[in-house]
Image: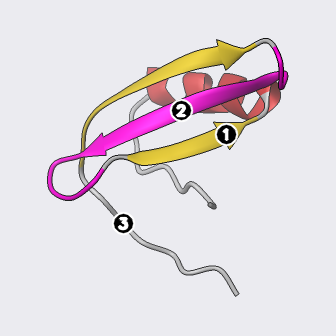
Amino acid sequence: MSEKKVIAVKDWTCAMSDELGRVALRINPTDGEPVLVLITVFQAAKMGRELQSPKRVQLSI
């Protein structure tokens, strides 16, 4: 079972991986180590829409 965790995000970056066809997302929390996640292009587009209207976003890792 996956554990749900809420973190405060300082900043984030993303890049497209041509070899994998995935988006590499790096989340820098306000405290602790960076979190690296591979997501699909569709998941990245959904996150982009959600970030345009800020609210609490749940990310299942």
Q: Which one is nearer the viewer's eye here, 55 or 20?
A: 20
Horizontally, is 28 left or right of 46 in the view?
A: left
Residue located 53% across and 32% down the image: 25
Between disc 1 and disc 2, whose residue precedes? 2
Residue denoted by label 3? 6
| In the rendered image, the vertical position of residue 29 relative to residue 26, given as above or below | below
Residue denoted by label 1? 38
Three-letter amino acid code at disc 3? Val
Q: Is residue 31 magenta?
A: yes
Residue located 60% across and 29% down the image: 24
Between disc 2 and disc 3, whose residue precedes? 3
Range of magenta residues: 19-33
Three-letter amino acid code at disc 2? Leu
Q: Which one is nearer the viewer's eye here, 42 or 23?
A: 23
Residue denoted by label 2? 25
Three-letter amino acid code at disc 1? Leu
**Contact, mark 1 vs mark 2 (Cβ under 8 Å):** yes
Residue located 55% across and 81% down the image: 3
Horizontally, is 41 left or right of 26 in the view?
A: right
Label 1 crowd bin: few (<14), some (14–19), many (20+), radius 10 Å? some
**Contact, mark 2 vs mark 3 (Cβ under 8 Å):** no
Label 3 crowd bin: few (<14), some (14–19), many (20+), radius 10 Å? few
Q: Is residue 21 magenta?
A: yes
Label 2 crowd bin: few (<14), some (14–19), many (20+), radius 10 Å? some
Q: Nearer the viewer, mark 1 or mark 3?
A: 1
| Secondary structure of residue under mark 1 | strand
